[in-house]
Amino acid sequence: MPQVEGRYRLVAHCETLVPSEAAYGWTVLATTLRPEMCTDSEMLRAYQEQHITVEPGFRWIKNPAAISPVWLEKAERIAALAMLTVVGLLVYAVIQRQVRLYLREHERHIPGNKGPTATPTAAVVFALFRPVTLVHFAVDNAPLLEVHGIQEDHRIVWEAVGIDHAWYQGVTARQNSRLLATPP
């Protein structure tokens, strides 16, 4: 049987289709800037250039199911929720930044999701403290605090964020601390 060779050629003429404006979707930005301070395009560009500040923390809220169960009737309540969310995410970002800077400067590592890391997320830092327990108790009606579960990794983190070591050394409770009464 003789060998047969087949060849095919496809010739296509392409043209770019421009989607309609309705296909683009919406981007909602809330700001206190007045329109004369910057254009919508400048504001959108500044928003899109954020990669290491608070913006990554908002990924979860972009899912409609994340915010839709919240019922806020007044604009002031919506603004308050937005402000609390931003402040919380800023604190989260500052903790992450400070720990990463400290670990890099001191060439240290803490446990991460996949082994030791010098670039933990704030979630990893918080998870590191899960086994730490603060116990309030009273001896002879004298209120006391004890902290259990502290490891070297915790000391590294509190150095990084500037927490006073005395807080973790079983200091006595302050006068205004609320202690639960122990049964006789």
Image: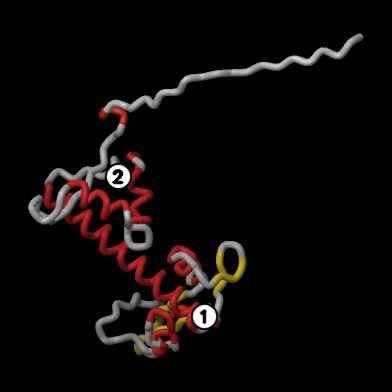
* Residue 155 in view, yes or no: no
Q: Position of residue 74 (x, y in %)?
A: 12, 46
Q: Quadrant of residue 21?
A: top left
Quadrant of the rendered structure where residue 84 is? bottom left
In the rendered structure, find residue 129 and report the number of the disc placed on it.
none
- Does the image show residue 163? yes
In the rendered image, the quadrant that contains the N terminus is top right
Residue under the point 26% across and 64% down: 87
Residue at point 51%, 84% (across, down): 106
State whether residue 64 is above or below residue 99: above
* Number of numbered discs: 2
Q: Position of residue 16 (x, y in %)?
A: 39, 26
Which residue is painted at 37% across and 58% down in the image? Answer: 51
Task: Tell me the amino acid under the disc marked 1.
Answer: Ile
Spot occupied by residue 12 in the image (x, y as percentages of width and height): 51, 19
SS under mark 1: loop
Residue at numbered disc 2: 67
Q: x and y percent of residue 8 in the render?
A: 66, 16
Q: Looking at the image, which is closer to me, 107 or 23?
A: 23
Looking at marks 1 and 2 on the same chain, the residue that comes earlier in the sequence is marked by: 2
In the rendered image, the residue lying farthest to the top is 1
**Is 120 placed above or below 12 here?**
below
Residue topped by disc 1: 150
Q: Tell me if mark 1 has few (under 14), some (14-19) or many (20+) residues whose alpha carbon lies within 10 angstroms of its own.
A: some
The answer to whether marks 1 and 2 mark residues whose Cβ atoms lie closer than 8 Å is no
